[in-house]
Amino acid sequence: MSSASSVSVFALTLNRRAAQVDQFLERALSPEGEDKTKPWPTRLKNAMRHGVLGGGKRIRPFLVIETVAMLGGDEKCALRAGAALELVHCYSLIHDDLPAMDDDDLRRGRPTVHCAFDEATAILAGDALLTLAFEIMAARETHPDAAVRAECVTILAKAAGAGAMVGGQMLDLAAEGRFGDPAPDAEGVRLLQAMKTGAMLTAALELGGVIAGADAPRRRLLERFGRALGAAYQIADDILDRESTTEALGKRAGKDRGKGKGTLVDLLGMDRARAECRELSAEAMAALEPFGPSADTLRAAFGFTVARST
Amino acid sequence: MSSASSVSVFALTLNRRAAQVDQFLERALSPEGEDKTKPWPTRLKNAMRHGVLGGGKRIRPFLVIETVAMLGGDEKCALRAGAALELVHCYSLIHDDLPAMDDDDLRRGRPTVHCAFDEATAILAGDALLTLAFEIMAARETHPDAAVRAECVTILAKAAGAGAMVGGQMLDLAAEGRFGDPAPDAEGVRLLQAMKTGAMLTAALELGGVIAGADAPRRRLLERFGRALGAAYQIADDILDRESTTEALGKRAGKDRGKGKGTLVDLLGMDRARAECRELSAEAMAALEPFGPSADTLRAAFGFTVARST
């Protein structure tokens, strides 16, 4: 099969999984799921839905589900855990877009939540989505073994917390110089990105391993793959941001440069950034090697991620 | 023992528990607890500490710990679960104080987090504290039984989510009229308060019951007590807000009236509000009756709460 048609087969699989995830999220954010005595306020619910249901590739749930499928685990459990991870991703976008943060008015080609609603509602919608993610993860339906559910909560909390995603967003704001810090060097940018975006992608692989009951050596391989994927994803994103237009991206292009934030592409140059992507690709493929052909979808996921730009 | 000296014995117990909680929170928010490869950014950490370690009665952890003590459960487990609950309470104060929300500059007699730092940092500090709460709750040290930990996560997520605390804050903003809604009547205010503050206080009792392994009937009694306590707490707070000065409260007094928000005191008048408090007291005492003398500390907690104002 040619590389082009592999990519298109992969895109179909990705879309099919995204439809499953969207269906789950639609239900999780609809009134039927609620306690009638304590209803979600309508404006809050609408803002949560706006922030979650407006498209998106659902790459994080995809990785959870495909990892579990590869290991022969229960895909329904994987769907719930993946959807919880996606809710955390969506909340982080809502808060990142706020005027006090990145001040973005466009996301996936639509107004951001604080533009479509207001700032207070956007803050609360993000808070509610983060909280809902943990409620879904801890629920009995997510896995029959409570120890697995508790471990999934731990993985999610670590990936989203001060030592990872939220901390990465903080470093990102600091990298703009707004608190008087010097601009980070390449190593600083790598740490920032590993925290801000890498940790949540790595968490997808870790969740897959835990849900499918993988042994410790396999879980370490999955984590290694996740870290390489996260790093490559970010470099690919920076290359794409450099080369694309706002129209094609559905969000403002080149916005990082506008704020004087250095990406790895800026700091290393396009050629060395692409070379780093290739090294990460080799690392990712080495981590998947012991899984044999069963890991082909994860291989394609890596290829798809990097193929966006390099 | 006279009522006055009961209150002072209770205040000593409350202070002793608060010191235990503060010690735990100090450790949870200090560098030693961190993964050295992904450190918490210093500014973020300092903002989290500012928002949590600035005093506070720690009434929610107190209720978890005393409920567990009453039922003969493990107080160390209760301390962790109570501290997690307190982190959620603290995050909610940080976000509620933001300019886009209640726009408060003073909290417990100190500058609010967005005043001491900045808005972006305050948003992220809140996000990180909410996330840390779930990390602490799900950790093995919180309870040897993973099913108990998962249930504690569920209780916390429900109490903090769109159908409870965050939803209540949304209703509170709507009650100011900023989204064009009519002002709520007494029933609407009761729902708002049950969601905004009642759910987290009720969660304290529920967590205590689960951690101590209470049976279903006892858990229902604890929940009933929690609901009555939450409602009484809020009315007492409104009475206090009406009668106090900014200096005595450590936060702006009478701020709800300034925004035209009706409290139960406004809607029912002082006498009927006090009568409602007495009814709630009878309800709370009835719920505790089957626990006999072992529930004396919870009884005193109710008295202390209401005694602040009535």
Image: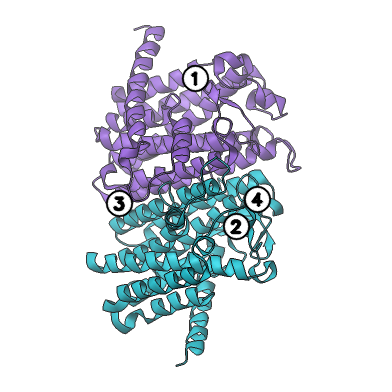
Chain colours: A purple, B cyan
Q: Kindly identify the amino acid type of the residue bearing the numbered disc 1.
A: Val
Classed neighbour count for the residue bearing mark 4: other residues with Cα under 10 Å, few (<14), some (14–19), many (≥20): few
Mark 1 or mark 2, which is nearer to you? 2
Residue A107 position, x and y percent, is 55, 25
Q: Dot 4: what SS?
A: loop
Q: Circle 1 is placed at which residue position?
A: A306
Q: Dot 1: what SS?
A: helix
Asked if one can make out residue B225 in the rendered structure from this viewpoint, the answer is yes
**Spatial separation of the CA atoms under disc 1 and disc 2:** 53 Å
Mark 2 or mark 3, which is nearer to you? 2
**Spatial separation of the CA atoms under disc 2 and disc 3:** 45 Å
- Marks 3 & 1 on one chain: yes
Q: Circle 3 is placed at which residue position?
A: A147
The one of B153 and A1 positioned closer to us in this rendering = B153
Q: For the point 29% across and 42% down, which residue is it? A: A142
Classed neighbour count for the residue bearing mark 2: other residues with Cα under 10 Å, few (<14), some (14–19), many (≥20): some
**Spatial separation of the CA atoms under disc 3 and disc 1:** 35 Å
Residue A189 position, x and y percent, is 63, 34
Q: Circle 4 is placed at which residue position?
A: B103
**Spatial separation of the CA atoms under disc 4 and disc 1:** 44 Å
Circles 4 and 1: CB atoms closer than 8 Å: no
- Marks 4 & 2 on one chain: yes
**Spatial separation of the CA atoms under disc 4 and disc 2:** 12 Å
Residue A160 position, x and y percent, is 49, 43
Mark 4 or mark 1, which is nearer to you? 4
Q: Dot 3: what SS?
A: helix
**Figure quadrant of the C terminus of chain A:** top right
- Marks 4 & 1 on one chain: no
Q: For the point 57% across and 70% down, which residue is it? A: B240
Q: Dot 2: what SS?
A: helix
Circles 4 and 2: CB atoms closer than 8 Å: no
